[in-house]
Every structure is written in structure tokens, then in C-alpha cells.
Amino acid sequence: MPRITALCRAYVDLIVPISFDTLKEHGFLPGQDYLIPKEKIAELTAQYINQGSIYAGGPGANTIAGFKALGGQASFIGKVSNDVLGQNFTKDLKQRDIEFDTAIIENDITASCVIFVMPNGTRTILYNPSIADDVTLEDIMRNEKHLKQSAIFYMGWLNREQHCKKVTQKSVDLTTHAKRVSSLQSYGSRQNDDFSSISVADIILGNEDEYGLFMADMKLDNLEELANVYPDKILACTLGKKGATIYHGAEKIDISAKETDKVLDTTGAGDAWAAGFLYGIAHNIPLEESGKLGAACAAEIITHQGGRPQKSWAHLLPR
């Protein structure tokens, strides 16, 4: 059974119902995202942890959880602490039978998002990456066997710091038999990010906004031009309710979104799409059919809270 391994930031979401007045008292506006200091996120987490719901998250971990729910094997490389949120993250992976062998950082703060949800559903997201990028070369070597066995290697971070470049490069060196995937979810700009993970990727994943930033920095106007720059790469762009588009050289494939009567939480919809798409790639399923599997997974995840499957997704597989 094909294996996916993800090297990605480990995040935990704390989703908290809140009134407009209370949100205003904290100094935040509805519908905005805020990068706040590490100490502040810890303070808010402690204040609201008994009033909200905890969901282990992060794009790479969400994606491999979907891949696992479809029937594949999965491994995760990412850094957490031994705090309440880190314990939740570790427990979630263990319950899903996902390999997680990365050294725990003692007495620190796991990367987290506090998501305040107003009565009308509007979300305000407060986050801090904290220790999420502190993966070491030793952590990579602890996962050498899984990296060498992987059919898919998901690189969910870009290299903003020197040690990250070394960690990513070592992982790439160990995944010679894998399809390498670069996610644009944490994309910033050419000035801040190293492009090595994109240059070695066989597949690039992102949504419209993420691709827009990437193409602007490359001074390109559209995905067709980007596909010409990278004719050997598979470019997959998710479009929300409009579905997704896949480019591979001169080939363009439009994938419709799968309709569902129940939309409870769109968190992780793009990650679920990636899970189905990459599962199809790992099984040599054609691009169009892989995209349709991604659409089915995205439709499934938005029917419940949280960005990870709550049951097996085997019923979504093509017959």
C-alpha cells in the first residue's frame, strides 16, 4: 500500500464561539487573520480552552489524515511540545495509526490557531507558528525508512531559515522514489522564501490566492504561463465552489466541485482535495479521475467540524 510522508508545520486549532462585544474587547475585528506573539496565543489558549473545541490541524497533517482514511499508509514529520495542544496533536495521529516519530520539545508552546467564531459564522483567526519550524536533521534520520519507502513526499513549508533548508534538502535526498509535492499554503514572497522545495517538486498545490502571489512574484499573468515555465510539473489549483483546475504541460483539466446539501465547516477542504488527488497519483490513477477523487474528499470534509476525517473514506474510492 503506497505511503505518503509529510514534512509540515504541526498546528492545533482551538475553535471558540464568541460575541462581537467580547471580540472587540480583545481588540480584534471579525473576519480578519492576525499573527500574534507567542505569549499572547498561549494566554488566549489558557483563557478559552475550556470553552472551545480542539482540532489537530496543519495542511500536511490534514492531507495525510485524508490519505490514510482512503486506505493508504502515512507518516508525519513536524514539531510539537508536550503542552495540552501538542498532546492532542500526538494523540490524534496515534488514533489514526499515522507514524509520528519526531522528538517532542519539552515545556514550550505548540503552534496554534485560536479561531473565534461569531454567531453569524464569521471567523477571526489568531495564530503563531511558535516551534513549528524547529524540525532537526536528527528528526529526519529518525524517519529515514519511511521517507525512502514513500510514494508521495509532501513538503508543506518553505525555507525561511537556514536550518529549514538543510532539513528539506536531506528529506529530498531520501525520497528519490517519491513524487515530491510542494504546497503554496505558506507562500510568502521571493524576498523571504527559498524556492528549493518548489524547484524539486513534481506537483505544486495551491488555491487561487496562493497561486496569485506566486505568479505575481514570477511576473506571470496566469496559470497557463506558469505551466509553460514548468512543463514537467503538475500544477493543481483549487477554486472553492468552482472546483479545481489541473495543468500538466499543455494539458488543462477542469474538475467540478462535488455538491453536498450539508456544509458545516469549510476548514481543511483544500487539504482534503489534496488527499484524494495525491492518493490517486500514488495509485497511478489518471489526473482527471484523481481530481474527481479530490473533489469527493473535499465535499466529505465540509460536512463536519474540523479539517480531518471522522471515519473511513473508503466509500469515496472509484469502483
Image: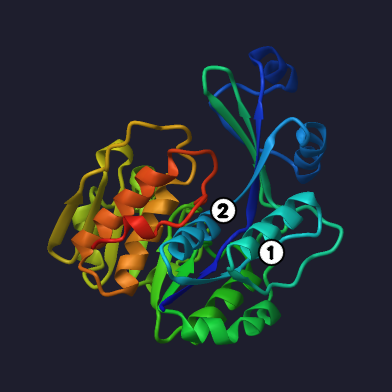
Residue at 43% from the left image edge and 38% from the top image edge? 303
* Label ID, residue 58: 2
Report the residue marked by disc 1: 79
Q: Quadrant of residue 313?
A: bottom left
Q: Amino acid at mark 2?
A: Gly
Pointer 2: residues within 10 angstroms few (<14), some, or many (20+)?
many
Q: Is residue 304 visible?
A: yes
The correct choice, above or below, for 223 with respect to 175 in the image is above
- The percent position of residue 293, horizontal first and vertical second, equals 29, 56
Q: Amino acid at mark 1?
A: Lys
Quadrant where the N terminus lies? bottom left
Lateral position of residue 16 relative to residue 182, left or right? right
Furthest toward the right, the residue is 107
The correct choice, above or below, for 303 with respect to 74 in the image is above
Q: Quadrant of residue 252?
A: bottom left
Furthest toward the top, the residue is 21
Pointer 1: residues within 10 angstroms few (<14), some, or many (20+)?
many
- The percent position of residue 219, horizontal first and vertical second, equals 30, 52
Q: Are marks 1 and 2 in contact (CB under 8 Å)?
A: no
Question: Marks 1/2: CA distance?
Answer: 11 Å
Viewer-side residue, 258 vs 205: 258
Q: Is residue 217 visible?
A: no
Lateral position of residue 244 relative to residue 86, left or right? left
Secondary structure under badge 2?
loop
Viewer-side residue, 206 vs 15: 15
